[in-house]
Amino acid sequence: MRARVGPYQIRDVLGQGAMGVVYAAQDERLGRIVAIKTLTKNGDPTSRARLLREARAAAGLNHPGICQVFDVGEEKGELWVAMELLEGESLLDRIARGRIEIDEGLEICLGILGPLEYLHSRGMVHRDLKPSNIFLTPHGVKLLDFSLTVEHVSAPDTRLTQEGSIIGTPHYMAPEQWRAQPISPRTDIFACGAILYELLAGRWAFPGDDPIDVFHACAFEEPPRLTGPAGIEEIENVVRRSLEKKPRDRYATAAEMAAALKVARDRLRNASGVSATGTGEAVSQLRRFIALPFRLLRPDPELDFLASSLPEAISAALAGLEHVVVRSTSLAEGTTAGETDPRKLAAELDVDCVLRGTLMSAGSRLRLNAQLVEVPKGTVVWTLQEEVSLGDLFEVQDALSRRVVEGLAVPLSQREQARLRQDVPGNARAYELYLRAIHARAGGGSFTATANMTQRDLLRACLDADPDFAPAWARYGRVCRIISKYGLGNTEEHLDLARQAFERAKALNPDSPLFHNYYTFFELEEHGEPIEALRRLLGRVRARVADADLYAGLVAAARFGGLYQASLAAHERGRRLDPKLETSVHHTYFLLGQMDRVAGPDLLHAVRGDDETALGILRGSDAQSAEGTVKAYVDCLLAALEGRGADAERAYRRALDTGLRDPEHMFYFARALSRAGLGPVALEAGRRVVTRGFYCAQPLDDDPWLETLRAEPDFEDLRAQAREGRSAAVAAYAEAGGEELLGVSEI
């Protein structure tokens, strides 16, 4: 070991690499210990320029979170820089040591943002934030390596040393750096977000085996959502905004990001008890899974029903796991199992794991070939080949479901392990009928009698064969509710059948996501109990069920209670889990008067205020071919717009005779009746609306179509009843922790 570097007495070697050595040395002039970074005289010109740039950049900075540079010199062709000797470890080493607690990770990120804000305030961008350039000392975080630091620029980034080579670790580079576009402080914000994600999840936000894969991930893909203790969604929001692809969508400053992170941290602590001592629950990535429709290797009418129903049954079995978001098989309709581009599939369906398979008859048996594939890489996790009889279909579903869980490598609670062992059909015939019923639903319209009656009959036959199969009871309850709601059959009979079916499904498996999701709309539309639905669904959210359909139910339950901001927040939360999730949020926008955001069914567009457009829709073949109460509503609305008040009332009475019970559907009748000038009849309908649990206080105040209704002498009583119902819903929402769970308050 050499004795000196310039005026510094060497004490020890701290590190050594191909380009130079780092020493601990004594500054004999000032009596302090420093770190000396040297560059061998054989070092290339670019490395020399980088070291000099680092020295010059850091020398002008004075912040406790930035490593100080004291001196620079050259001796016999060897360049050296003297800087602050730090006690502690790099963040890279800390990550390598193992799990980082939530609060520790948040404090590290806040420690990075402080000096970063100072750096930006001096007109500089670091450009190379990564764990190896961040040092953890007993007194806080220190930023290192300013060799790529530049002033704020509007010109393209110059990150290349030699043509085609990239400095630094690609996993933290913002999209604009990859594209050699102008950079700004928001470029560092992206890197900080990527580091925070890694600290929490224990994995890179943008993984890849080579720079091309990493570039594609950074530029086009979203990292998996985070799951963990109650309140982690607030942290997730901060991470997501910092990782926006477009710089303008990120936080403008490090201080802004730090302020948002502190608020999120405090809410997390209040919600889940995560403390500064780091005793909180760990964060992990949500795996995003979809079972694609299976592909028939040759046409076979006897097997058609399995192509969609078997993957959907697998999806239903896996729904509601805490660490897995299950996309609906219907999203991939038209996507064949064997002809998919993994990168395109990952982007379009927002998934990172896909089950695909092929089916073929082999005499009296079924030949199945299935694969679990990680996308966008296209890595095959496992392959399963089976030849079974139709009597073994449930064993196939069960085996595939278990293999999927193993392949996803997600932790399962005891409750989840027990649930995966539930819902076993009693015999093969019952399960085949169940799958055929799923296929019947996929192939028919929701509001036509034929499709719903076919599914009902198949489910009834399934339950006759096995009266203890809970999933079939849940689906039977749903189809009977649909038939009752839309007047597609005997209303009271099917309403009673739906009630009995849901009671049976709950008794057999009270934790079934299928039951909870289907029961919500029965609870709202037939029982008129939005407050109970709110409590039940928020309880499921608190249990951290990663089920997008749960939030779809909350969209409706909150709206029925008059909690429109909570309804919108539930839609946003559901879309984070499943970007293609369909909810009834268009009705919420409609009630708020935000007509430009209404993007629902044509019949909703028909009441946006443009009479000519509305008349065109209502006179069209789709509207005129509707059945049951939907057809009655079309006739009522058309009559109202054409000034035929008596016909509008007749259509309303026909809907009541058909069995109209849904208070939200009734609200739209009340609007049409009011528009037709039928104040007393509209008031009658309005009473039904509010009495049955649709607390529409705001539209009662400001919907322009309700002017006639508002002129009625008893309107104030109706409005007071709606406000009272909403107040009760607000209280229930607060009691169930709605504000912390959905992130919005209702007053």
Image (cartoon, grey):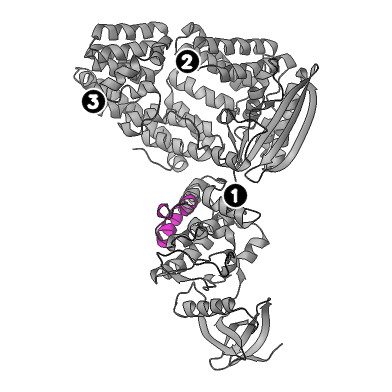
Extreme residue in the front direction: 163
Q: Is residue 470 magenta-colored?
A: no
Determine the CA span between mark 3 and mark 2: 29 Å
Left or right: residue 592 versus residue 531 is: left
The residue at 56%/84% (across/down) is: 82
Residue 447 marker: 2
Distance between the Cα atoms at labels 2 and 1?
A: 45 Å
Please identify the quarter of the rendering in which residue 332 is found.
Answer: top right
Residue type of the residue flagged with mark 2:
Phe
The spot of residue 660 in percent (x, y) is 40, 12
User: Horizontal and vertical percent for residue 658?
Assistant: 41, 7
Residue 252 visible from this viewpoint: yes
Q: Secondary structure at mark 3?
A: helix
Q: Would residue 247 be found to the left or right of residue 202 on screen? A: left
Q: Earlier in the sequence, mark 2 or mark 1?
A: 1
For discs 3 and 1, the disc positioned in front in the rendered view: 3
Q: Nearer the viewer, mark 2 or mark 1?
A: 2
Q: Is residue 441 left or right of residue 640?
A: right
Q: Read off the residue under disc 3.
A: 704
Quadrant placement of the N terminus? bottom right
Question: Is 424 situated above or below 112?
Answer: above
Q: Which residue is mark 1?
A: 281
For the residue carrying disc 3, how many other residues have a C-alpha within 10 Å: few (<14), some (14-19), or many (20+)? some
Q: Position of residue 544 (x, y in %)?
A: 56, 39
Tags 2 and 1 in contact by the CB under 8 Å rule? no
Rendered residue at 72%/40% (across/down): 406
> Is 242 in the magenta?
yes
Magenta region, residue range: 239-264
Q: Nearer the viewer, residue 28 or 358?
A: 358
**Three-letter code for the amino acid on which mark 1 is drawn:** Glu
| SS assignment at label 2 | loop
